[in-house]
Image (spheres, helix red, strand yellow):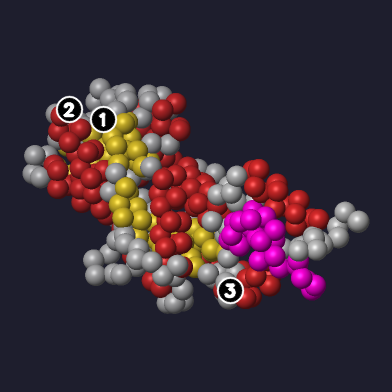
Amino acid sequence: MAANKRSPSVADGPVTMEDLAKLAGVSTITVSRALRDSPLVTEKTREKIRQLAADQGYRFNLSARNLRMRRSYSIAVVVEMTPVKGRPMSDPYPLELLGGITQELTTAGYSVVLTSRQLLGTPPVQGADGMILLGQGSHGEAMHALQSINMPLVVWGAPEAGDATVVVGSDNHKGGCSAGERFLELGRRKLIFLGDVDHAEIEQRCTGFIDTINGRGSVHILRPKAFTFEAGFECVRTLLRKKPHGALDGLFAASDLLAMGAIRALTETGLRVPEDVSVIGYDDTPGAASFVPPLTSVHQYLRDGGVLLAKKMLALLEGQPAQSEMLPTTLIVRHT
């Protein structure tokens, strides 16, 4: 008997996935997962089914399966971010979010189409089963653009009051509160918030910060239009040219890169960090711990956020309920 001859227990005609399931003594979904190399099936079972499929001359027709199911089994991940030299795509945001998303979606048998808002009209995006948006954009314009496409949508960011879109994000208000509490503990009262509050997440960080200070100090808002080291440096250096030493003793930045740039500007004008000015960043990137001095920062659980985004999307695709959800934040105290 030839090695690829079909088992006599299988009826004449093309071998189907159901045939393989009967021969292997498993369910059809287990066969499907095994042929897609899903970790939901043990390696031993995957190997058994792959060998059986080879012996029976079966080929997994992904296109036919998708057409039959009227699904592409792909999710478009739209990154609302313009990569620049000072803020590359290799930064923890969005890379850690993407890692969590990819881990969860590929395990469920979906592919990930990474794209930008400018490419929403391309076939890979138009053919996707749903979209995950990373970042709402200034004044929420990116989220509103994707809502108009009428496709299952999950967003990383901050929920808008009265909006039914499923949003996953960090508790930005609490993150801002923790920075304010730290400054009050340190006796800092002349404070700066550094960040573009046109972005919903940044606005919530600023609001939490101001709510916590609550008249026990002054808060001046600086609004750089980028989230880079250079933007933080230029913004704070311009401020220091106008204000005398002693005009500020604490600075809370909406990102670690902004905080690092601010520290450079402070030290270049003769101010010591943290002796004269305490500084807190946001994101707790790997660079925060190795910066000199090591940067105090609000930690976001970005990889967990990516996994949660994918879980919400899968629930929507299966017709299950999905609600917005916020992850906790943690203030990591270091030397600044």
Report the front residue among 67 and 130: 67
The amino acid on which the numbered mark 3 sits, given as a three-letter code, is Met
Residue 64 lies left or right of residue 281; in this view the side is right
Q: Amino acid at mark 1?
A: Ser
Question: In this rendering, would 125 be left or right of 315?
Answer: right
Disc 1 crowd, CA 10 A, few/some/many (<14, 14-19, 20+): many
Do the numbered discs 1 and 3 sit on residues whose CB atoms are within 8 Å?
no
Comes first in the chain, label 3 or label 2? 3
- The reply to whether dot 1 and dot 2 touch (C-beta < 8 Å) is yes
Q: Residue 322 in the image: x percent, y percent?
A: 35, 63
Residue drawn at 32 percent across, 62 percent down: 323
Q: Does residue 63 appear in this view?
A: yes
Marking on residue 186: 2
Which residue bears the numbered disc 1?
A: 278
Q: Is residue 262 magenta?
A: no
Distance (Cα) linking label 3 and label 2: 60 Å
- Upstream in the sequence, badge 1 or badge 3? 3
Residue range in magenta is 10-36
Secondary structure under the numbered disc 2 in the rendered image:
loop
Disc nearest the viewer among 1 and 3: 3
Whether residue 127 can be seen here: no
Residue 42, percent from left and from top = 60, 45
